[in-house]
Image (cartoon, helix red, strand yellow):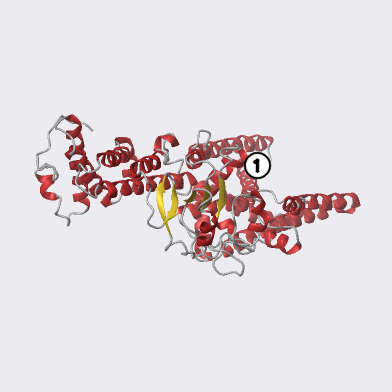
Amino acid sequence: TVFPVGCTALAVVATLYWLGLLAHSYLIIFMGLFGLLGLSPYIYLPLSASTMALDTWGDQRDLDGFLTHFLRKEYGTFQLAASEIGGGPDMGERLLKYLQVTGEECFHIPIVLAVLGVIGSFLVQKRRHVWRHYAALCLLAGYLSYVLVFHYLSNLNFEPLFLGVQKRFWMQANIYMWLFAGAGFSASMSYVTNLSFGKSPAAGRWRWIFSLLFVSILGQSMFMLHFPKVNHRHNRVVESYGKKMLESMPKNAIMLVNGDLNNNAVKYLQQCENMRTDVAILGLQQMSWSWWVPMHRHHYPNITFPGNRYHVSFPGSFNMFQFLKANMRKKPIFLCGPWKAGDDSTEIHYQLHPYGLCHKISRKGKQPKKLFGYLLKGWKALPKMSDFGPWKPRLYGDDTWEHVAFHDTWHRMVYHSGVVSFHASQGPPAKDEKLLSLAKNIYDHIFSRDLRKLLSAKKVYRTTDYRGAGIIYAKWAATKKKGYARAKAEKAMLTLWKIYLKLAPEDQELKPFVDASRNPFTGEVVESFGDDD
């Protein structure tokens, strides 16, 4: 941002100088004051840091901390992401992607007009319009400096979510493009009407008519193209995701969150809507910065931080094993997201049990006392797809956080169903009918008609999902007497196995049962009760 703003300021100064307005000293003073006013938010940073408010980012109480924050040293100055995330294509590929996406968003018309506008600004012959040379030169320098510097330092690849992040930064550069497009459009209209009508009064009239028609058509076309993608007035996906995660926590729990979505969704609800303020939410990434524990320890008086920083190598720091050992007996602790990369200190002594969108942390070898009750509670803690409202693939594209929430929820459902199925499949069907019923109910939801239609299009089902679900339906049916419910479950078994065999034809174990329409756990042929879904 510094580069284009600086060049734009030069464009304004050059224009005012050419017009002779800088001869007035009061104007120079006002320009300086407004320039300083634009930097005034930075005055708030040390003031905010001095209060040590909850979730203040960084410690700007001294000059070193201020410069660290101002220059984003923690992520790399002038870069979008930390080194462990960054990488991807080179500068040339990024520039081509920028031009491609920008052109597609506006039918390439403004890009052509912007080129004409740049050329036209430098072809002005009248002396009283020569100031446009200076203004155009500075604005072009602002545009090029932003685009070139940004794409040189933009260390993200073209994965949909990361591309969406980069698109938001392109908006600043596109302001310049649209300015030049306006100049190019004005020059084009003048040329066309003068060529058609000469110097007659009708030329000005037709120029306005043509301009109005063109702008109306282009504006309406872009509105019709983009409005469905940006109309989020009924969007509650991230809110529902965060609410389910936060509401599922037991009283006074500790949530260890990792990932932007997990952190921001619950932090907003707790701090802005006062939801579940009894839960302590600790970001694993945030705790790893040197300033976090000193700045935030006092907000968590009942939590022990066994060091001055969460890290595996810095002097005076602590690892996750030490943190859990110091706090495990005080409160239930949950992990929402993955462990922080590089810290494997928990592997020997602790294990994770699925619980909604998170995991409950317990000591190694310790199982929930009431397994069925725990697994049922964990399933209820998961949001269902209906909680997100009507799913709109065009609105929630691959580059949105809504898409991430959808996929995270889906994968948690499949993971939870796998855990329940594992416990339900440890013995004969009659051993634990409650676990089998829970596993079947989960698969009823996962493979429901509406969800199957949506997810098949998105290709998120794994081949083994069909096989595992079919086994659960078969075992559940084996615990029931003949009738409609059993027949319906066995029909689901056959449907899923047929899909599985198409995807994995090399697996011949299930083929005889499918060909004979037979349940392997009963040995009986599947009954037919019509075309039920």
Residue closer to the observer: 207 or 503: 503
**As drawn, is 185 to the left or to the right of 513?**
right
- x and y percentages locating residue 472 in the rendered image: 23, 44
How many marks the image carries: the answer is: 1
**As drawn, is 62 to the left or to the right of 380?**
right
SS for dot 1: loop
**Residue 123 seen in the current view:** no
Residue 340 position (above or below residue 263): below
Residue closer to the observer: 113 or 321: 321
Disc 1 crowd rating (10 Å Cα; few below 14, some 14-19, many 20+) is: few
- x and y percentages locating residue 157 in the rendered image: 49, 60
Residue 205 position (above or below residue 121): above
Residue at coordinates 40% horizontally, 34% vertically from top-left? 386
- x and y percentages locating residue 432 in the rendered image: 25, 42
Q: Quadrant of residue 123?
A: bottom right
Residue at coordinates 18% horizontally, 50% vertically from top-left? 501
Look at label 1 and name its amino acid. Gly
Residue at coordinates 52% horizontally, 55% vertically from top-left? 99
Residue 75 position (above or below residue 165): below
Q: For the C terminus, give its image quadrant.
A: top left
- x and y percentages locating residue 409 in the rendered image: 41, 45
Q: Which residue is mark 1?
A: 198
Q: For the N terminus, give its image quadrant.
A: bottom right
**Residue 59 seen in the current view:** yes
Residue closer to the observer: 223 or 60: 60
